[in-house]
Image (cartoon, rainbow, N blue to C red):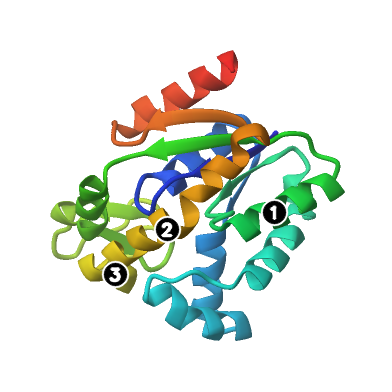
Amino acid sequence: MQIIIFGSPGVGKGTQAKILAVKLGIAHISTGDILREAIKKETDLGKKAKEIVESGGLVPDEIMAGMIKDVLLDERCKNGFILDGFPRTIQQAHILTKILSELNYGKPILIKLDAKDEIIISRLGNRLVCSKCGNIIVNTDYTENYSCHICKSLNSYIKRKDDDEEVIRRRLKVYHETTAPVFDYYHDKAIIIEIDGAQEIDYVTSNILEKMKTD
């Protein structure tokens, strides 16, 4: 099973990808997590990507494509995978189509999550991320000496630079101009499932799974 989860920044792609990966027994491939880890470790890729990511831009296709192909060839993807954060450009979509063809995969399932920009801005502007494990909470939930319920780290929650409102608006502009057209590219190249991503997390998950059964 090969799944692409698609939508604007902050629509819930990462959350749903993690849940679906567990429920379906497939690998969750998050390009965002891969990049953030590279930035944290200050690898050559991380140094190149840091400025681009923090300004809300897109990492060059040739870097992302090489990373994705390496991951898809990994043993953990043998039962399938869910791609989170790729493709983000028409060129990346062409590259992914070529990679999937080389690996003898059929049509992927593309799950598109939708939400209005103002909902996205509110979501991202009010979230904090655990600097140790990447868990996300709403800013209003945070209290002094807050302990992450995933990794148990104390006072590890931070606000990402790319979650500032000005950066969020730039990211959304990039999405509408560069990434949104990718959906049209997949019109006849994937099994399309469209979901309202503004709903509660559990509802979105159940809606996705139900549509996957019927489509």
Query: In terms of depth relative to the viewer, which is nearer, 128 or 123?
Result: 123
| Res. 91 image quadrant | bottom right
Which badge, 3 or 2, comes first in the chain's sequence? 3
Q: x, y percentage for residue 204?
A: 38, 29
* Residue 157 visible, this orientation: no
For label 2, the residue is 177
Q: Are marks 2 and 1 in contact (CB under 8 Å)?
A: no
Which badge, 1 or 3, comes first in the chain's sequence? 1
Q: Quadrant of the C terminus?
A: top right
Q: Amino acid at mark 3?
A: Val
Label 2: element kind: helix
Q: Quadrant of the N terminus?
A: top right
How far is mark 2 from mark 1, CA to CA?
A: 17 Å
Q: Amino acid at mark 1?
A: His
How far is mark 1 from mark 3, CA to CA?
A: 28 Å
Query: In terms of depth relative to the viewer, which is nearer, 165 or 176?
Result: 176
Q: x, y percentage for residue 26?
A: 65, 39
Mark in the foreground, 3 or 2: 2
Instruction: Check disc 2: other Cα within 10 Å, few if <14, some if 14-19, many if 20+.
Output: few
Is residue 148 left or right of 212 when viewed as pictured?
A: left
Mark in the foreground, 1 or 3: 1
Q: Which mark is residue 94?
A: 1
Q: x, y percentage for residue 121?
A: 23, 54
Instruction: Check disc 3: other Cα within 10 Å, few if <14, some if 14-19, many if 20+.
Output: some
For label 3, the residue is 167
* Residue 36 visible, this orientation: yes
Label 1: element kind: helix
Q: Amino acid at mark 2?
A: Glu
Q: Vertically, is 13 above or below 124?
A: above
Query: In terms of depth relative to the viewer, which is nearer, 8 or 185?
Result: 185
**Residue drawn at (27%, 56%) of the image:** 124
